[in-house]
Amino acid sequence: MIRVRGLVKRFGQHTVLHGIDLDVARGQVVVVIGPSGSGKTTLLRCLNFLEEYDDGEVVVDGALLGYRRGADGRLGRRSEEEIAKSRSEIGMVFQSFNLFPHKSVLDNITLAPIYIKGVRRDVAKQVATELLTKVGLAHKADAYPGTLSSGQQQRVAIARALAMQPKVMLFDEVTSALDPELVGEVLTVMRGLAEDGMTMVIVSHEMQFAREVAHRVVFLDGGRILEEGPPKTLFREPSSERLHAFLRRFTEGYKLSV
């Protein structure tokens, strides 16, 4: 579903991603871990072209993202309309919820399908109601974001992304802004998506969640993938001292808990 080859991203003279290669199969859950500043968020933003990459390519469901390759082999930027269409098929949930405070929960979920995809209002409402049920918030359809807990707002944000019926879901540290007691309710929704076969790339520091849900874990450091593999292998027997040191910061007993 996702194929990344030689991905390079620079901000001025600073290179953030150094030739990333990554494959994500359809229905696979890949969790990206790594220290702050390692390029995790930038990688996600390149996967839906919120950041234009400087070299390499990102292919989603067989289509080159953001660019078109000409007959001479050179890349040309796609039109804004084409890029917007591609983005609509790649859902992304951020650390901040970004809900419209003056719109109800139901309206927050239905606006994009109606105005971007042209979905009929009654159909969009039906889908939104089903998604709210899925995330356990059907009773909050008429509520406003300001009346919800942070965990509930994040679940609404997930439902909003799903309402666009994306091929892929990207999650950027979606529990980092939540109180500890609210983290579980959001991770439960994400576990359900994994069980339903949604293709997901998740940036997270929730190591136990990664152990339980991920098909593959990718360790990013300094803009490079240092290790990747099944969570049981990666957490139990890290092959680099860098990953060993990173994991030790979370729990001294991680080897025993896998």
Image (spheres, rainbow, N blue to C red):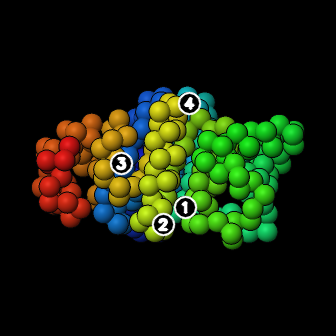
Secondary element type, mark 4: loop
- Point out the frontmost of discs 4 and 1: 1
Q: Residue 228: give x, y in percent of width and height.
A: 27, 42
Q: Earlier in the sequence, mark 3 or mark 2?
A: 2
Secondary element type, mark 3: helix
Q: Is residue 15 above or below residue 136?
A: below
At 33% from the left and 38% from the top, the residue drawn is 216
| Badge 1 density bin: few <14, some 14–19, many ≥20, Cα 10 Å | many
> Could you tell me if the residues under marks 3 and 1 are in contact, i.e. CB atoms within 8 Å?
no
Q: Earlier in the sequence, mark 2 or mark 4?
A: 4
| Badge 2 density bin: few <14, some 14–19, many ≥20, Cα 10 Å | some
The residue indicated by pointer 4 is 61
Cα gap from disc 3 to disc 2, whole angstroms: 15 Å
Report the amino acid beneath label 3.
Answer: Phe
> Is 21 positioned to the left or the right of 100 in the image?
left
The residue indicated by pointer 1 is 151
The residue indicated by pointer 3 is 209
Secondary element type, mark 1: helix
Q: Is residue 193 above or below residue 39?
A: above
Q: Which mark is residue 178?
A: 2
Q: Earlier in the sequence, mark 4 or mark 3?
A: 4
